[in-house]
Amino acid sequence: MTAVDARPETMAALRFPAGFRWGTATAAYQIEGAAAEGGRTPSIWDTFSRTPGKVRNGDTGDIAADHLHRMPDDVALMRDLGVTDYRFSVSWPRVQPTGRGPAAERGLDFYRRLVDELLAAGIRPVATLYHWDLPQELEDAGGWPERDTAHRFTEYTALVAGALGDRVATWTTLNEPWCGAFLGYGNGVHAPGRTSHPAALRAAHHFNLAHGGATRVLRDRLPSTAEISLTLNLHALRPLTDSPADRDAVRRIDAVGNRIFLDPVFHGRLPEDLVEDTAPVTDWSFVRDGDLEIVSAPLDSLGINYYSPSVVSAGGSGSPSPSPSPWAGAEERVAFAPAAGPRTAMGWPVDADGLYELLTRLRDELPGLPLLVTENGAAYDDYADPSGQVHDPERVAYLAAHLSAVHRAIEDGVDVRGYFLWSLLDNFEWAQGYSKRFGIVHVDFASQRRTVKDSARWYADVIARGGLTRP
């Protein structure tokens, strides 16, 4: 920018509201390691990652970022960055190894220490009860397509709430149940690797039921001031053209990708068009009387995970859906078109407008409900240079654009209370293994050395200023 461009409106700062929560996020299986310590038993991701061909390079989360052993140093990193909140997940098989019965106290002790360390550092702990690591014994008994798994989840929730409820004020029941249901049971690219549309739809309902049951348990066991939430990876959908066929394709994907969770949780109903669209797949007889009343237990906030939008068209144009497809009841009539513009190392388009579109949609559909951006970030092929520095300007640009979108949404009346950058550390990136790096802190997985990237320093400056310079 030249001197003549330095107009006040160009250089003005984007200030966020007082008390805005500046966070970062991780997930247990992606960073903890210590997979067989303290009584922890295998989760579906331990099993899946050991299945040949399922995870790139045969990587597993056995060691990951070794966070269980290095937790105090990782908390110190967050303290130095100035983050106000840390969103972590609790490993179900570390706390309740078989998915039934009493807790493993050694497992709970780790989370007690983590919470104490965070509080001592002035960081608010935000606990997620489920981030995809179902105990393998429960999968062997049928997994999420079985109703009993939802009941097991409520019992597990009671164990964790009893151990941490006096010190953790913000709770998330589930992270991205769409991925657990449709990538895990629909097209099998995530654990447990099953490929059945009926199983995916049953799993989605039982995730909803587990969420509602867990919410009731948390209300019963936590102080009245506790914040209870759910995190969804809602899909920002756009039609390829304005044709009726393309708009109907968006409707179909919106039903099975978004409203399958939003309508039961917030309105106590199943979307009628979803039931119609999926009639060839299932009759929804697994939804019992009283289920939707449980599912729609009131929440204090909703978490939104966002990375990129999707461009949808009627079948026959654009790129065909993957086979098998996760989109139960919709895949034969829709296609996904490539979006224009730059992409991350995951191949995902960079488009911050999609985040703004989601936030304003929720403002209109769920008025009065506070929102949190619980995941947002990007993978790039960054590395430590010969001087030991990690320069990641693409990530900085991605984060700046998306934070600007959040600020624009706030200006337009959306009640966004916080932003959690994904992720604190480079980690085990699910089916991609260690090949994709989302962290603002570089991890050398051979030595476990941490190196703060330029993006972390940039984020620390944003937090210190309470905003960023207008792009």
Image: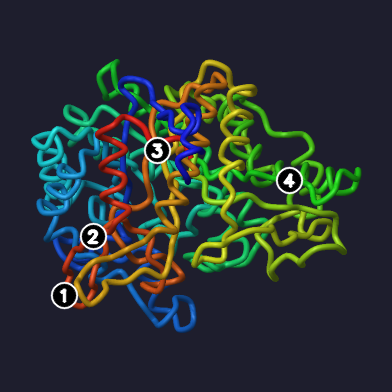
- What residue sits right under mark 3 in the picture? 173
- What residue sits right under mark 2 in the picture? 32
Mark number, residue 447? 1
- Tell me whether the residue at label 3 lies in contact with that at label 2, contact meaning CB atoms closer than 8 angstroms: no
Question: Which badge, 3 or 2, is on the more N-terminal residue?
Answer: 2
Q: Residue at x 61, y 55 (%)?
A: 200
| Residue nearest the viewer, comparing 330 with 456 | 456
Determine crowd level at label 4: few under 14, some 14-19, many 20+ residues with C-alpha closer than 10 A.
Answer: many
Question: Which badge, 4 or 3, is on the more N-terminal residue?
Answer: 3
Q: Could you tell me how far apart the alpha carbons at marks 4 and 3 are, in whole angstroms?
A: 29 Å
Check disc 3 and report its element: helix, strand or loop. strand
Q: Amino acid at mark 4?
A: Arg
Residue 178 rendering spot, x and y as whole percentages? 56, 49
Q: Amino acid at mark 1?
A: Ser
Question: Which badge, 1 or 4, is on the more N-terminal residue?
Answer: 4
Residue 45 rendering spot, x and y as whole percentages? 39, 66
Question: Which badge, 1 or 3, is on the more N-terminal residue?
Answer: 3
Q: Is residue 389 left or right of residue 271?
A: left
Picture layout, residue 110 above or below residue 140: above
Dividing the picture into quadrants, the one containing residue 263 is top right
Of discs 4 and 3, which sits in the foreground? 4
Picture layout, residue 192 above or below residue 330: below
Q: Is residue 156 left or right of residue 33?
A: right
Of discs 1 and 3, which sits in the foreground? 1
- Tell me whether the residue at label 2 lies in contact with that at label 4, contact meaning CB atoms closer than 8 angstroms: no
